[in-house]
Amino acid sequence: MARTNDKHRVISLFCWFIRVKEELGSGRVRMVWVSLPVVGMLLVWWWVGFSAVNADYIKYKDANQPVASRVGDLLSRMTLEEKIGQMVQIDRSVANVDTMRTHSIGSVLSGGGSAPLPEASAEDWVNMINEFQKGALVSRLGIPMIYGIDAVHGHNNVYNATIFPHNVGLGATRDPELVRRIGSATALEARATGIPYVFAPCIAVCRDPRWGRCYESYSEDHKIVQEMTEIIPGLQGDIPANSRKGVPYVGGNKKVAACAKHFVGDGGTTRGINENNTVVDRHELLSIHMPAYSDSIIKGVATVMISYSSWNGEKMHANRDLVTGFLKGTLKFKGFVISDWEGVDRITSPPHANYSYSVQASILAGLDMIMIPFKYIEFIDDLISLVKNNVVPMDRIDDAVGRILLVKFTMGLFENPLADLSLVNELGSQAHRDLAREAVRKSLVLLKNGKNGTNPNPVIPLPKKVSKILVAGSHADNLGYQCGGWTMEWQGFSGNNYTRGTTILSAIKSTVDSSTEIIYRENPDGNFVKSNNFAYAIVVVGEHPYAETSGDSMNLTMAEPGPSVISNVCESVKCIVIIISGRPIVIEPYISSIDALVAAWLPGTEGQGITDVLFGDHGFSGKLPRTWFRTVDQLPMNFGDTHYDPLFPLGFGIETESIKELVTRSTSDGVVGRPCILVLVLALILSL
């Protein structure tokens, strides 16, 4: 209102000046000379009024201004301390209104399992994040913070969220359009909780399954990983047709800023050891590990996270050649580069041994935002000192902050900094669970279907109506095992009480005929199996949940008592074994006793996707996203290697038809003219 009144006052003064000028224009020279002081005074009044109007105008707050102009204007107003505050990302556990305001903190995150309270609702998340945001908005310049979270297979830290298959399973689908829809669903569920930024996707190319993060990789084949970068427009929206390469894009408040990670070569470390050294020449680095980053940048990815690992001995968090030279220079990436959790500390060994040096090395390498996440005062003080002592140039700070502000302006954070409750019903919605169920059934890879490999007697599809079925194994009725790491907690969980979903056992019970008796024993002995006259058994075994270094494994064996369950069950009854794992594991010693074998990866909360294909409502279509080895002594072994001798090669997968497709095809083949075939088909239908 004050600004409007100022406008009116200036307009009135200007009109009065015009009227005086017209009166003085009567030709009386003496009057003109006498009135010049009056005219000068009027001009001064006009200038004062004009300045009063423009004093209220702040360019960076004007959404009609070009983003570059807004970034430049805001940068020009910021102190060194405010700029460095924008480069800081802290964990929610150390965030509060006063900290956000005092230090102009640029970002807050939830680490794995870091939630407002147990079983927090979408509203609980929104309220917490808005409280932090209010602290940022009352700082001197009112720059909104951006809240980030790991959403690597759905919104996996949040109770009741839809948990999709981990990336290794999505790679098995070979379906980029499906992955794009998963990105859109994940964005909606993140926004439902007030979160506009997710640390996904992981576009590592895992070259050794001994790596504990291999399930976060879509494939050993970089071309499959490149195809799956279609998740980025799902998360962020489609970039405008005239968008320049490398410029980030986030399409409104139903989309989120994405993060391509971990730059670069994290999937190629020696023996698959997490955070270790990738020893390859530049050609191999650029041809295998880099292409998905190029594709992500073309699709407008907003941020890139740096890897803990090293390339030929040089820590990626300190690699100026690749971060500034290649990522920002050659690939023309214009978004911001973020460190991994305490990634700057780990530049030295032991971590944090010379923190000031680590800060210097990472910022000069080209990192823009630092996931600290706790000791932020030390980082701020060290970087201020480095700038004031001319160790880190001011233009490097301006480049970092300019990139952070570019993303914030682009995604509309200045116009809509506070979340509301309009999307809370998207969290764990039935539409998203149906999508996850579709993803599960498309991700399953059928590795064996009948004991005799040369002339198989197919076991799948299984009949729904039989007298009695045995379900066995530690993974049959355990939602935590089914989801894997990065679910509710960093390392995942065990049991069925930490979030909502459908276990494989529950899915079987809801799928078979009501007259079919289902017996569940986690670890049955052989005598029990032999004495019960089961029609068939479904055995579900595999790995226990893990994340990052705790998942590194040099033997890749299935968790106990998996091998003994297979032995006790499969030696006595027709058995279908489902492997729940984040990667290929040792299976060759048991395969001869197994009638049908399914690689189910880490399918997430929607177990009915598994029964959809087991019982023939849909056919198997998944293809191995990575080579299944015979023994760990062969590793690393990837498609194209000279010593390539797998148990199952990359791309292997037996396809089956659904019962509906089988019946349709049999009818179209002229089954009516062959009564014996007609009888067999009708018998199959009745049994199912």
Image (cartoon, rainbow, N blue to C red):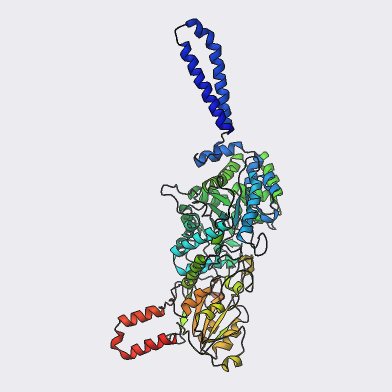
Q: Nearer the viewer, residue 248 or 563?
A: 248
- 388 displayed left or right of 436: right
Please tell me which residue is depicted at 50% across the width and 9% down the height of the picture.
32
Above-or-below relation of 578 to 29 = below
Residue 138: x, y in percent? 65, 43
Residue 151: x, y in percent? 57, 61
Q: Residue furthest bottom?
A: 531
Residue 278: x, y in percent? 56, 61
Callout count: 0
Residue 21 in view = yes
Question: In which quarter of the view is residue 450 placed?
Answer: bottom left
Residue 62: x, y in percent? 53, 39
Please tell me which residue is depicted at 64% across the width and 54% down the height of the picture.
127
Q: Nearer the viewer, residue 202 or 613?
A: 613
Quadrant housing the C terminus = bottom left
Residue 279 in view = no
Quadrant housing the N terminus = top right
Q: Nearer the viewer, residue 595 or 196?
A: 196
Question: In which quarter of the view is residue 161 placed?
Answer: bottom right
Q: Nearer the viewer, residue 659 or 565?
A: 659
Above-or-below relation of 85 to 256 = above
Above-or-below relation of 543 to 225 = below
Please tell me which residue is depicted at 56% across the width and 45% down the height of the picture.
414
